[in-house]
Amino acid sequence: MKPSGYSLDATFAALADPTRRAILVRLANGEATVTELAGPFDMSQPAISKHLKVLERAGLITRGREAQRRPRKLEPRPLAEATDWIERYRRVWEANFARLDAVLHELKSKEKKTVDALLEDVKPKPKQRRSK
């Protein structure tokens, strides 16, 4: 049984916000404190902390402890699970699109044959000479 913090719903809900995605991009380069994470954003430290709590509840980041510092670190497992889930459906849709392409190709081929046959029917026939 998976811990509830690793649910796909929580992962996708956390990823829905552009600020949280930007925080994850920053943490992909290494751990950072709340102050360091808040730097590029035009929002208060408490607002950033709320975003961090959402990411923590989703299991996307963890909080460390180094003396007075509390650096956040990216946790790859929930992202890998979301990627696996998306990949599974990507393969299903690619197979569906491949089948659709084959049907469309077949229909176009039949249509071309039908049009060619109709053109043959309306094409003026060469007149035959009568022998005397």
Image (cartoon, rainbow, N blue to C red):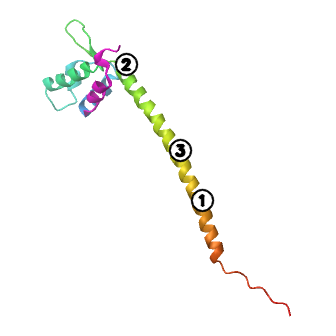
Number of the label disc, if any, that sits on residue 99: 3
Q: CA distance from mark 3 to mark 1?
A: 17 Å
- Range drawn in magenta: 1-17
Q: Secondary structure at mark 3?
A: helix
Q: CA distance from mark 2 to mark 3?
A: 33 Å
- Which secondary structure is most common in the magenta stretch? helix
Q: Say few, some or many: other residues with alpha carbon within 10 Å of mark 1 (under 14 / 14 to 19 / 20 or more).
A: few
Between label 2 and label 1, give the one nearer the viewer: 1
Instruction: Give above or below for 113 relative to 25.
Output: below
Q: Which mark is residue 110?
A: 1
Q: Position of residue 77 (x, y in %)?
A: 37, 19
The reply to whether residue 8 is visible in this rendering is yes
Quadrant housing the N terminus: top left
Q: Residue at x 59, y 67 (%)?
A: 115
Answer whether residue 63 is magenta in the image. no
Asked if residue 119 is positioned above or below residue 90 in the image, the reply reads below
Mark 3 or mark 1: whose residue is earlier in sequence: 3
Q: Secondary structure at mark 2?
A: helix
> Of label 2 and label 1, which has the lower sequence position?
2
